[in-house]
Amino acid sequence: MERKITRFSVSLPQDLYDELENRVIKKGYASRSELVRDMIREKLVDEKWADSKGDVVGVLTIIYDHHQRELNQKMIDIQHGSYINVLCSTHIHINHHNCLETIMIKGGPDKIEEIAFEIGGLKGVKYAKLTKTIAF
């Protein structure tokens, strides 16, 4: 199914236009339109999360030291305490000390962020990022 495309014009100060052009080049976008579409989608996701009364989905990406005492059990306890919200997780070994894990979580935005903060704040977690998603 082909979607209708609407063209419109935007006026920008030169410095803002230059920054837009730099992002197109640095991030490898095929066009300014692709970059602007991504920026609009990102804003829509943020607003949907802020206003949502229903379920949304997030992906929590974490890197942690698997030698940190009791860290694995604490992460498992948090996930099991929210088992209805955790859809699945993946786990890989980056090197001898570090693991990468992704946890897909569905539920209210507040509940997802709570789980992400709990896990991200554990001792031994070196990096935690929640990627927010919505259905477009």
Image: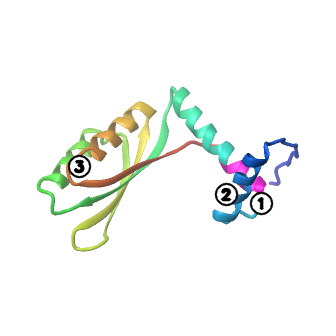
Q: Amino acid at mark 1?
A: Ser
- Can you give x and y, in whole percent of width and height, for residue 52 in the image? 53, 29
Residue 108 showing in the rendered view: no
Q: Which element is circle 2 on?
A: helix
Question: How far is the residue under mark 2 from the one under mark 1?
Answer: 10 Å
Quarter residue 67 falls in: bottom left
Disc on res. 75: 3
Eye-nearest disc, 2 or 1: 2
Are circles 1 and 3 on residues that touch, CB within 8 Å? no
Prevailing secondary structure class for the magenta stretch in the rendered image: helix
Q: Residue at x 79, y 42 (%)?
A: 13
**Left of 77 or right of it: where is 49?**
right
Q: Which mark is residue 23?
A: 2
Of the two numbered discs 2 and 1 on the same chain, state the one appearing first in sequence: 2
The local secondary structure at tag 3 comes to helix
Q: Nearer the viewer, residue 92 or 20?
A: 20
